[in-house]
Amino acid sequence: MSTQRPELAAQSEVVELIPALRAFARTFCPKPEEADDLVQETLTKALANLDKFEPGTRLKSWLFTIMRNTFCTRIKKSSRETIGLPEGITARLTTEASQEWTVQAEEVRRALERLPSHHREMLVLIVMLGERYEDAAEICGCAVGTVKSRLSRARQQLRRELGEVSSPASLE
């Protein structure tokens, strides 16, 4: 029982030094959560090796040494280890956020709905379905020149609807 009493006293003293450990950890880690992790790792190591602490020496200095060594070990390990994927590969694995595409698709759909039906028809036939001008003319029962002019007007109006060009009134 006499061997446990000095250990209990040392454990109590370790607990009293936690604020000082936190302050010292902030000199190594600017982020509070990283500093707290360093304190926790230091306390774990210190309590596991409390039997190696030499009574009569400063416990605070001993704990600070453990913390500094723990931090240095972390830095050495992080320089050798690659966490996650190798550098450069992440750019090829990223996926664009679908929310923006969804919003843009909805804007285009609404702008298409605002077009006159004969303009919308040409955009759908030629741009979306990939029909040739001649085939679109045959489908719509009009001349190829009419198809081209309707398509041109549809594209211009769609750009205006989407805010990509100014309206004709502002061009004058």
Image: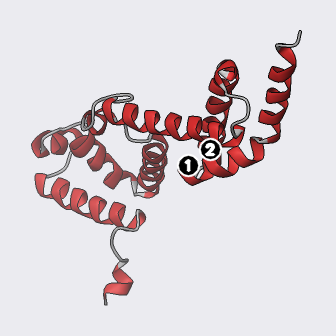
* Residue 39 left/right relative to 19: left
* Residue 72 left/right relative to 53: left
Residue 89 picture location, percent across and down: 26, 33
Identify the image quadrant of residue 1: top right
* Residue 1 left/right relative to 28: right
Mark 2 highlights which residue? 35
Mark 1 highlights which residue? 29
Mark 1 nearby-residue class (10 Å; few <14, some 14–19, many ≥20): some
By what rule are the colours in the image chosen?
Answer: secondary structure
| Observer-nearest of 68 and 87 | 68
Query: Which residue is rendered at x = 63% and y = 50% of the image?
Result: 24
CB atoms of marks 2 and 1 within 8 Å: yes
Position of residue 149 relative to residue 5, above or below, is below
| Observer-nearest of 113 and 13 | 13
Pick the quarter of the image with the C terminus. Answer: bottom left
* Residue 77 left/right relative to 1: left
Q: Residue 140, can we see it?
A: no
Kindly state the secondary structure of the residue where label 2 is placed: helix
Identify the image quadrant of residue 33: top right
Residue 123 picture location, percent across and down: 28, 49
- Residue type at mark 1: give it: Cys
- Residue type at mark 2: give it: Ala
Residue 76 picture location, percent across and down: 37, 35
Position of residue 8 relative to residue 80, above or below, is above
Ranked by sequence position, the earlier of labels 2 and 1 is 1
| Observer-nearest of 106 and 127 | 106
